[in-house]
Image (spheres, grey):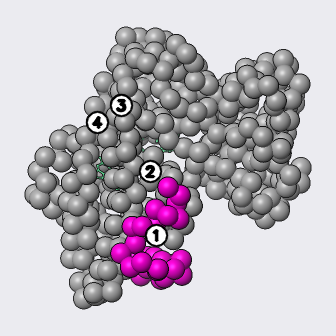
């Protein structure tokens, strides 16, 4: 089923047009803006209602809801506001629905979540919760949950896999490379990401991108950077041990390279965004025909380019690959280009005849993509995983 068919099928009124969907999204955005200042209260009400009407869902969430309180709600509101962009949204929702099976989410829970969401927003919107506003939220939630449930019910593969930590290598005070042996090969494509749950932080799942292309022996390598105040990343970097058992969720994301687009490739990466780029390069190296690939790998200082030597080594043995380091700080003698990734990449022009992949922090993705669009790169040539909630 295509995105278009799925949306049309799920729309309550057959024949509603994209512009009617845009109207629905406008109503949702403006009504949410009204209640947003009281997001904490709204969150408490949402979860209290959910756990009252469907008490069995409490066990799906982390024990300490103070840490997590706004995650699902924030995600829900973010996603519901995007129903007028089905081409991007629907494939993501299908992956998300399959992914939600790892929590133990069942089809009937979607009705309870919808009721709790609409109840919380309705209560806080007061008189502004008109029939029209309620209809907009109901329709949009129906589209979103319909796409997730349909995909989840159709999936026959496992809801999650087990993995055993084989190696934990600290490569800096805040960074570790972790090798995990999965119980069986996980069917991801190079460039996609997986979610993991570790014994140190039960029920706190986080997305990580394998740094290797899929292997027949099921081994995965992850690069994890501890973020300030981060619950899971700090625990993985500081406390993961060889022999730990991880749970791993189904693959997500659209950062793969389709064979045969005919265009050369540009990859722009910073931080642990280097991991999926390495996986993609490894995958490309195994193909009979490989497009010329230009990689820019950037950071604030040379130390941030923690895996640059292995990328450079790959470029020495593959003539189709060219890797350029980029650093923001003036550090003479490194041979790196100077500036932000957005500065340096656009200095080279519009890259209009390239397929472009951007991997890294949400801030880096935002600035690079927006500068490239201004420089003239066509939007439909650029790929990144846009649905980050942090
Ligand atoms: C598609 C995708 C792929 C990812 N791949 C990787 C990967 O390969 N390796 C990896 O280390 N991480 C990766 N991440 C980020 C990872 O999933 C977590 O968000 C991150 O590790 C923080 O989790 P935490 O529990 O430690 O922080 P939380 O406890 O969730 O958050 C603590 C604080 O840190 C902030 N924060 C959260 N994430 C980040 C971030 N990325 N940078 C800066 N501040 C942040 C939060 O806003 C909050 O203030 C990926 C994220 C996405 C969406
Ligand atoms: C339209 C419906 C839904 C959408 C769009 C949605 C979206 C999301 C997203 C994006 C996350 C990950 C947040 C992150 O890690 O950054 C998440 C987490 C989660 N969702 Fe959903 N979800 C939906 C329905 C449900 C339902 C029906 C349940 C079952 C009660 C559920 C239970 C959870 C749980 C347990 C988590 C992990 C804990 C947390 O992060 O809060 N979700 N959801």
Q: Tag 4, which secondary structure?
A: loop
Whole-number angstrom distance, CA of label 1 to CA of label 4: 35 Å
* Residue that mark 4 sits on: 203
Q: Tag 2, which secondary structure?
A: helix
Residue 172's mark? none
Badge 4 crowding class, 10 Å Cα cut-off, few under 14, some 14 to 19, many 20 or more, is: some
Q: Nearer the viewer, mark 3 or mark 4?
A: 3
Q: Position of residue 43 (x, y in %)?
A: 26, 61
Residue 333, placed above or below residue 155? above
Badge 1 crowding class, 10 Å Cα cut-off, few under 14, some 14 to 19, many 20 or more, is: some
Whole-number angstrom distance, CA of label 3 to CA of label 4: 18 Å
Q: Position of residue 388 (x, y in %)?
A: 50, 51
Quarter occupied by residue 123? bottom left
Q: Nearer the viewer, mark 2 or mark 1?
A: 1
* Residue that mark 3 sits on: 158
Badge 2 crowding class, 10 Å Cα cut-off, few under 14, some 14 to 19, many 20 or more, is: many
Q: Nearer the viewer, mark 2 or mark 4?
A: 2
**Magenta part of the chain:** 1-29
Q: Are marks 3 and 1 in contact (CB under 8 Å)?
A: no
Magenta span contains residue 304: no
Q: Residue at x 21, y 64 (%)?
A: 116
Badge 3 crowding class, 10 Å Cα cut-off, few under 14, some 14 to 19, many 20 or more, is: few
N-terminal of the pair, mark 1 or mark 4, is 1
Q: Nearer the viewer, mark 3 or mark 1?
A: 1
Secondary structure character of the magenta stretch overall: helix
Residue 94's mark? 2
N-terminal of the pair, mark 2 or mark 1, is 1
Query: Is residue 197 or residue 324 the one in the foreground?
Result: 197
Query: Is residue 374 or residue 259 the one in the foreground?
Result: 259
């Amino acid at each position: 089923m295509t995105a278009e068919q799925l949306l049309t099928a799920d729309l309550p009124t057959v024949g509603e047009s994209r512009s009617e969907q845009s109207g629905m999204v406008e109503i949702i955005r403006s009504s949410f803006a009204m209640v947003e200042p009281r997001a904490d209260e709204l969150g408490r009400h949402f979860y209290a209602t959910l756990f009252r009407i469907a008490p069995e869902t409490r066990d799906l969430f982390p024990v300490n809801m103070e840490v997590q309180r706004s995650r699902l709600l924030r995600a829900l509101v973010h996603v519901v506001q995007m129903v007028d962009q089905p081409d991007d949204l629907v494939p993501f929702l299908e992956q998300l629905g399959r992914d939600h099976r790892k929590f133990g989410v069942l089809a009937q829970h979607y009705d309870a979540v919808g009721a709790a969401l609409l109840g919380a927003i309705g209560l806080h919107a007061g008189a502004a919760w008109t029939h029209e506003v309620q209809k907009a939220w109901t329709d949009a939630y129906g589209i979103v949950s319909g796409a997730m449930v349909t995909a989840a019910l159709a999936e026959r593969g496992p809801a999650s896999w087990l993995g055993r930590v084989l190696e934990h290598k600290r490569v800096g005070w805040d960074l570790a490379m972790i090798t995990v042996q999965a119980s069986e090969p996980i069917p991801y494509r190079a460039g996609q990401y997986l979610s993991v749950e570790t014994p140190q932080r039960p029920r706190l799942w986080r997305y990580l991108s394998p740094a290797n292309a899929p292997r027949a022996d099921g081994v995965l390598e992850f690069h994890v950077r501890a973020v300030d105040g981060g619950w899971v990343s700090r625990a993985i970097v500081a406390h993961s041990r060889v022999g730990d058992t991880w749970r791993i969720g189904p693959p997500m994301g659209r950062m793969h390279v389709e064979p045969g687009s005919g265009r050369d490739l540009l990859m722009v990466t910073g931080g642990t965004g280097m991991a999926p780029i390495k996986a993609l390069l490894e995958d490309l190296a195994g193909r009979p025909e490989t497009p010329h690939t230009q990689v820019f790998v950037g950071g604030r200082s040379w130390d941030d380019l923690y895996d640059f030597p292995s990328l450079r080594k790959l470029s020495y043995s593959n003539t189709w690959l060219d890797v350029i380091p980029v650093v923001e700080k003036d550090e003479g003698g490194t041979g790196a280009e100077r500036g932000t990734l957005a500065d340096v990449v656009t200095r080279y022009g519009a890259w209009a005849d390239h397929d472009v992949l951007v991997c890294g922090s949400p801030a880096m993705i935002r600035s690079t993509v927006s500068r490239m669009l201004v420089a003239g790169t066509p939007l439909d040539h650029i790929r990144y995983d846009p649905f980050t909630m942090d």
